[in-house]
Amino acid sequence: MAFVATASGHIFGILALILLLVWLVHFRGGIELDSDNAERVFNVHPFLMYFGFIFFAGEAIMAYKTIHAERKVQKFAHMSLHVVAFVLGIIGIYATFKYHKKQGITNMYSLHSWLGMGTFILYGLQWIFGFFNFWIRGVDSSTRRSYAPWHIFFGRVLLYMAICTAESGLMQSSTLLGLQKSNESRLINFTGLAILLFGIAVDLTVASVPNAY
């Protein structure tokens, strides 16, 4: 079951990335943070918030559960992939603020933005608590064992919060662009579905592999 869940996670994760790139490059004109075209600047946001943030966060979760190596190596891979997700997520958030400034749009006005910023802040706190509890020497094993279930629980919650944010963002984009019953709208729907299935597969990987603290 663990192998099937992990393989499914990789497949749906890559499928979502391909669909997202087709949408942003073919339908929306490309991705460029320093472009004079505001739309191309904005496109950095959905790209990095999925590929940079959600995809790498999901891979970090699966890596800890499925890498056959010493516990320290598993922890390092898990922590490093989360750092990558966090850094790329910062750039993704910056892109949307830059777009809003170019277009004269108010920041943090939608449920999507509230969910996104809340998820991102909690994600940073989750990483900090995890780093000090599981990586820094001096924390006794009983403390680690008592905190570990909460760390796993909040990790799964944050993954679904990030996915909910992505789904609301795709829906918001489709609505603002006025897309109805078009190839582009169907592509956005399939992208959202692939992202959801990626999250489910990651969560199933967590449930399928026994915990080792």
Image: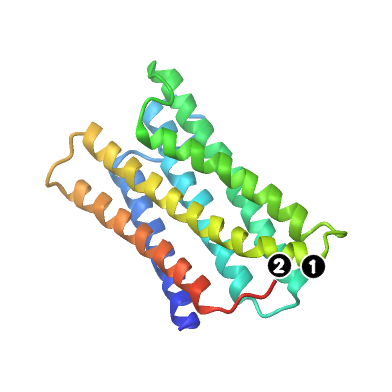
Q: As drawn, is 136 to the left or to the right of 78?
A: right
**Mark 2–mark 1 contact, CB under 8 Å?**
yes
Residue 37 position by quadrant: top left
- Tell me, for residue 141, which label it has, or none: 1
Q: Residue at x 66, y 50 (%)?
A: 127
Q: Position of residue 53 (x, y in %)?
A: 52, 49
- Tell me, for residue 94, which label it has, or none: none
Q: Position of residue 177 (x, y in %)?
A: 23, 33
Q: Residue furthest right?
A: 138
Q: Please tell me whether mark 2 sits on a helix, a strand or a loop.
A: helix
Q: Residue at x 12, y 47 (%)?
A: 181
Q: Residue at x 61, y 64 (%)?
A: 149
Q: Which residue is mark 2?
A: 145
Q: Quarter holding the C terminus? A: bottom right
Q: How is the image coloured?
A: rainbow
Q: Please tell me whether mark 1 sits on a helix, a strand or a loop.
A: helix
Q: As drawn, is 119 to the left or to the right of 80?
A: left
Q: How many marks?
A: 2
Q: As drawn, is 212 to the left or to the right of 202?
A: right
Q: Residue furthest top?
A: 104
Query: Quick one: 21 or 12, which is closer to the camera?
Result: 12
Q: Residue at x 69, y 64 (%)?
A: 146
Q: Position of residue 161 (x, y in %)?
A: 44, 49
Mark 2 surroundings: few (<14), some (14-19) or many (≥20) residues within 10 A: some
Instruction: Report the Cα–Cα distance between label 2 and label 1.
Output: 6 Å
The three-letter code of the residue at mark 2 reads Arg
Q: Quarter holding the N terminus? A: bottom left
